[in-house]
């Protein structure tokens, strides 16, 4: 018997009381948006959705048409339901407060509407990443400040990867489960529960072209992997880099591995490339919930107190023993 996303959420709430109706509504609306985005992605050139939109986002990155389509879809689908107070996105400078004509709820939704922008036009897996927080000051108007909560405060997080299959991956803090989109029925069905990342791995993911810019601990770790059976690790490693965080993290959830986008000397004043609040936090929570670990080299990413909506962070996540090793290499190194 196929279990739909709706049925799964209702039954979880009945059994564990961990998905109140407003949160269920939120997750279902996000899933519905992902379904629409999946359709637009699949249409590709036929839908006229490929290519650049000719604009830049707050990070100074060129926006693709699909970045904007996905962002609009998520905002329009989520603003009228009464479950949200405001939204924040990689593609918007400021928060989007639910307009006055709609009731305001207590949840805050953050998203990277289409992660892996450089892969859109070349037909490689991309995805939507989302994170849900709760407003802690119910009486006052919602501001950016309400969003600046550590990743541990998330009440739901997930992503949807648009690849050979469209897969929605979700946590509400009770493990990780996966749902696959049945395109004919137009619904997500449960395909995996209690996802567990293998603790040991022989696979790493990092953009090797940046090697000369890395810090010593990252160089040390990768060099040890490259040395294979002849080096201190005593085993051969394999490398994968899809350049869509969603697709790289999905592989790690399925078969283990380590993913790194560390600080590097190209832009020394930025802590990293990836964004804390709508990329690193949701992915870190999923990975921890699946028995893995996530760190910025100094501390667990989920413990970082954010200072800004678009704050960047160095990311090391995946199989626990490997992440612990890279973190240890960082802690052993004294910066000059
Ligand atoms: P995006 O949100 O603009 O798509 O950027 C984030 C992406 C990640 O998905 C991926 O891990 C990384 O950027 C790839 O970077 P690079 O092109 O340096 O390999
Ligand atoms: Mg992204």
Image (cartoon, helix red, strand yellow):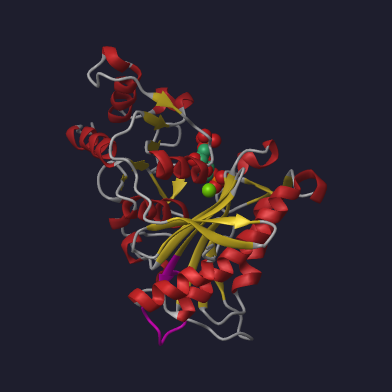
| Viewer-side residue, 269 vs 334 | 334
Q: Is residue 143 magenta?
A: yes
Task: Name the image quarter holding residue 226.
Answer: top left
Q: Examine the rendering and report whether any part of residue 262 can be seen.
A: no
Q: Main secondary structure of the magenta part?
A: loop
Residue 175 position in % (x across, y down): 35, 59
In front here: 179 or 309?
179
Closer to us: 160 or 280 = 160
Residue range highlighted in magenta? 132-144
Within the magenta stretch, is there residue 179? no
Q: Nearer the viewer, residue 218 or 130?
A: 130
Most extreme residue toward the top is: 230
Check the image and report above or below for 33 versus 232.
below
The extreme front residue here reads 1
Residue 237 image position (x, y, % from top left): 36, 23
Would residue 218 be visible to someone looking at this image? yes
Number of residue marks: 0
Q: Residue at x 35, y 42 (%)?
A: 318
Which residue is at 25% across, 22% downward?
Answer: 233
Residue 267 at x, y percent in the picture:
45, 36
User: In the displayed structure, does residue 1 sit left or right of residue 286?
Assistant: right
Q: Position of residue 242 (x, y in %)?
A: 53, 35
* Residue 304 position by quadrant: bottom left
Which quarter of the rendering shows the C terminus?
Answer: top left
Compared to residue 60, the image places residue 89 above or below, namely below
């Amino acid at each position: 018997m196929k279990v739909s996303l709706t049925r799964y959420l209702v039954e979880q709430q009945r059994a564990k009381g961990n998905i109140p109706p407003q949160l269920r509504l939120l997750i279902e609306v996000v899933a519905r948006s992902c379904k629409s985005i999946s359709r637009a992605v699949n249409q590709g050139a036929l839908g006229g959705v490929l290519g650049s939109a000719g604009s830049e986002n707050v990070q100074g990155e060129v926006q693709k048409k699909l970045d904007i389509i996905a962002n609009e879809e998520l905002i329009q689908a989520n603003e009228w339901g009464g479950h949200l107070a405001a939204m924040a996105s990689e593609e918007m400078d400021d928060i989007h407060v639910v307009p006055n004509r709609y009731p305001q709820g207590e949840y805050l939704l953050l998203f990277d509407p289409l992660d892996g922008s450089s892969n859109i036009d070349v037909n490689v897996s991309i995805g939507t990443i989302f994170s849900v927080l709760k407003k802690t000051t119910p009486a006052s108007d919602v501001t950016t400040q309400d969003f600046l909560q550590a990743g541990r405060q998330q009440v739901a997080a997930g992503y949807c990867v648009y690849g050979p299959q469209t897969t929605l991956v979700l946590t509400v803090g009770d493990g990780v489960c996966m749902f696959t989109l049945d395109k004919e029925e137009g619904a997500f069905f449960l395909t995996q529960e209690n996802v567990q990342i293998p603790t040991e791995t022989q696979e790493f993911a990092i953009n090797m072209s940046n090697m000369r810019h890395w810090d010593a601990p990252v160089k040390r770790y990768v060099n040890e992997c490259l040395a294979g059976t002849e080096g201190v690790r005593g085993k051969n490693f394999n490398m994968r880099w899809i350049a869509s965080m969603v697709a790289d993290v999905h592989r790690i959830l399925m078969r283990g591995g380590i993913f790194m986008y560390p600080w590097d000397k190209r832009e020394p004043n930025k802590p990293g490339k990836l964004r804390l609040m709508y990329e690193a936090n949701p992915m870190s929570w999923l990975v921890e919930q699946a028995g893995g670990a996530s760190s910025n080299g100094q501390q667990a990413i989920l413990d970082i107190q954010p200072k800004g909506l678009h704050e960047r962070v160095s990311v090391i996540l995946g199989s626990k023993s490997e992440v612990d090793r890279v973190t240890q290499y960082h802690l052993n190194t004294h910066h000059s």
